[in-house]
Amino acid sequence: MREPYYARSANASGKKETLACHAQRASKLCGEFLRPISYSEIGTVLGGLHDFGKASDRFAEVLEGKRVHVNHAYPGAALAYWRYGQKETARMLATVIAAHHSYLDSNCIIRLKELMQGTGSGYDEEGNLFSLFGMTEMKEALEAFQAENPRLIGIKIPKLILEEDAVANMLLARFLLSALVDADYSASAEHFQPDYLKTHTGPALDSEDALGRLLQIRTEKQKNSTSSPALNALRDQLFEDCLHAAELPPGLYTLTAPTGLGKTLSLLAFAAKHCIKYRKMRRIILILPYLAIMEQNVRDYRKIFPELLELHSAAVLDEKAGFLAERWASSCIITTNVGFFEPLFSARPTDCRHLHQLAGSVIVLDEAQSLPSDLLEATLRTVHLLCTQYSCTVVFSTATQPSFQHLPGLEWKPTEIVPDPERLFQATRRVTYDWRIDEQVPYRRIAKELISHRQGCVIVNLRAHAKKLFRILEEIVSDAESEGIFYLTSDLCGAHRIKVLESIKERLAEGKCCYLVASQCIEAGVDLDFPIIFRALAPLESIIQAAGRCNRNGDGADGEVIVFLPEEEHLYPPGAYYQRAALCVKTLASRHPIDCFNLKHIEEYYEILYSNGDGDKEKLKKALEERDYRKVQEVYRLIEAKGVRVIVPWKDNMELFDSLQEEYGKNGLTRDLIRRATLLTVSSFAEDKVKECCIPLFFRTYGRENEVQTDWYLLENQKCYHPKLGLDFGVLETFDGIF
């Protein structure tokens, strides 16, 4: 054994970091990070013991460049298990410490016992040598470690609140791992960059300032509104309801209100006022279901929260935002369902690092109906825990509030923000519904009926259907009005979608001919206002969301929503839920005429839906039962297939495309290039066509000869990016390649 032991190699000043210094700093930070959930003593121990395994000759040889593949985490985990009595709390501490450089594994205790006893191979399951092995080595290292860190050994800790529920215990493990990983990474970074935490932490939340800006924006909107006085009065009432509810205690809330009532501003008012009332609330987190609606909302949110941090796959982050994104260390964050929920079920330290930041947050989940049905039980139990165990307030907002209380075995008793949501729905009857779902209707008939109106929109379930209908419209619309035909699906890159939406809004406002064919991507949060909507049969929540794009401002005669059954062989996207939910609509219609403004009818729909469902997917149930962190991470996927990403040559932004192409030629695919390319990126499930027609992009490691495969591609041939249809491989009958 040698002394002193070091944790880190030399920094720019030539100074190496001692193990004692690192352990003490990580201990202090981890304790601070866990204080919001009242486990600061636990954090002190986790941070103090996590790198105990570096008190060894084997790890010293790693720093000297003489050895690789040494596991220093397991000895620290074994020490925690040994010192704290091998009780359930000790098992949790050991599991978390063992994971801080690998992944959470509840079966690690078996290997920790072998490590202490000196039995087995002396290697972990990935072939890494334990830095300490056997009780003799452990005791010698402990003696040296204790001499340098007398305050870190034998700290009394509270008993963790552990439950029989696997979801609760596994979530606690992830929160503890989060604090440990953040403390470890931050303490390590400070050795090389002393101001690391200062540059990687945003300013504290200023709720009063945010609410002041919000009220100014509201006043401006009131002055400039072209909506009917009755509709504006309802919007004002919803806003006041949210301000009033913000005074209520932290917990679980729902906001049930029709589309077009300004829920976005009202929700932000609730969040800001709630943070003023309850000072322990540290940040506001806004969750949107789809990237397609992110672009529009971010511009509105940033007027209220200038420090807004975007955390999603399409976010373009500058250096400062990139630093904050590493730790979610911002006062206001906007992310997606995937970005928020999947880390709560992950086993990886990098995924979990930010979770401790969620404690004491106001979390606003917009379009709550978008959560996948086969993950609902685990997701909602986790949300409930965030409220009861982690000091969060969570708001589920939607015009079609799911009746989660009908899910078997789930406790779901939120507080509704709106005192009388039924009154709001009855007062906002701006559309009539025409249900044509008894027999199939060809798209050509729908197209002809659409163009009998001056303006209208058709929303279908599949992109192939959208393209077919668009082509029919091109055939039957006169040349003079062809400029008024629009197509909007996720085949369009972000910059293209923004441009299309702007053009549609202009034509609608000017009363010009305007026909839109779209997929579900416009149903949530997209501010369009058509006099008539045709909606292919879909889940009831999708139909009602589509209706929110019809007569949105209530400033004329009632709009019309026609629900029809397309005459097509394939009617629904892959996956069991969509078709099952659409058939539940037919079941409801067979019982009585559907009134989408009657909340009892919406609840009845969800009751039919949930009673016919199978609950969470069996693989997830089994993984939770076995407390298998990695399996849970594998099966908890909000989006089963994410496709491949294609950077496209959209004609209105060729300068950026050419720049990206040139940059790739020099440096290969880089994180900066991906950030810059987000507005020109399309996700495609036509993987075979993409591989046939696009250039695969690679990360380069050590020059061109060492390239790492990715799911990113670049489309050179402009013919495959249609000026209206976006990414469209069908335009080429033959394709000889682009290399």
Image: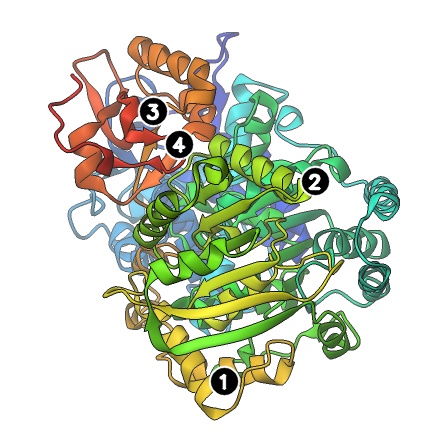
Q: Earlier in the sequence, mark 4 or mark 2?
A: 2
| Residue count near mark 3 (Cα–Cα under 10 Å), binned few <14, some 14–19, many ≥20 | many
For label 1, the residue is 607
Q: Secondary structure at mark 4?
A: strand
Q: Measured along the vertical axis of the image, is residue 122 above or below residue 266?
A: above
Q: Earlier in the sequence, mark 3 or mark 2?
A: 3
Amino acid type, label 3: Ala
For label 2, the residue is 300
Which quadrant is the N terminus positioned in? top left
> What residue is drawn where x is 80% and y is 63%?
238
Q: Earlier in the sequence, mark 3 or mark 1?
A: 3
Judge whether residue 635 can be spotted in this image: yes
Query: For residue 516, which numbered disc appears in the image?
Result: none
- How far across and down, in percent of the image, does residue 500 sit? 52, 36
Which is closer to the viewer, label 3 or label 1? 1
Amino acid type, label 2: Asp
Judge whether residue 127 can be spotted in this image: no
For label 3, the residue is 60
**Left or right: 245, with 720 as reference point:** right
Amino acid type, label 4: Thr
Q: Secondary structure at mark 1?
A: helix
Q: Earlier in the sequence, mark 4 or mark 1?
A: 1
For label 4, the residue is 681
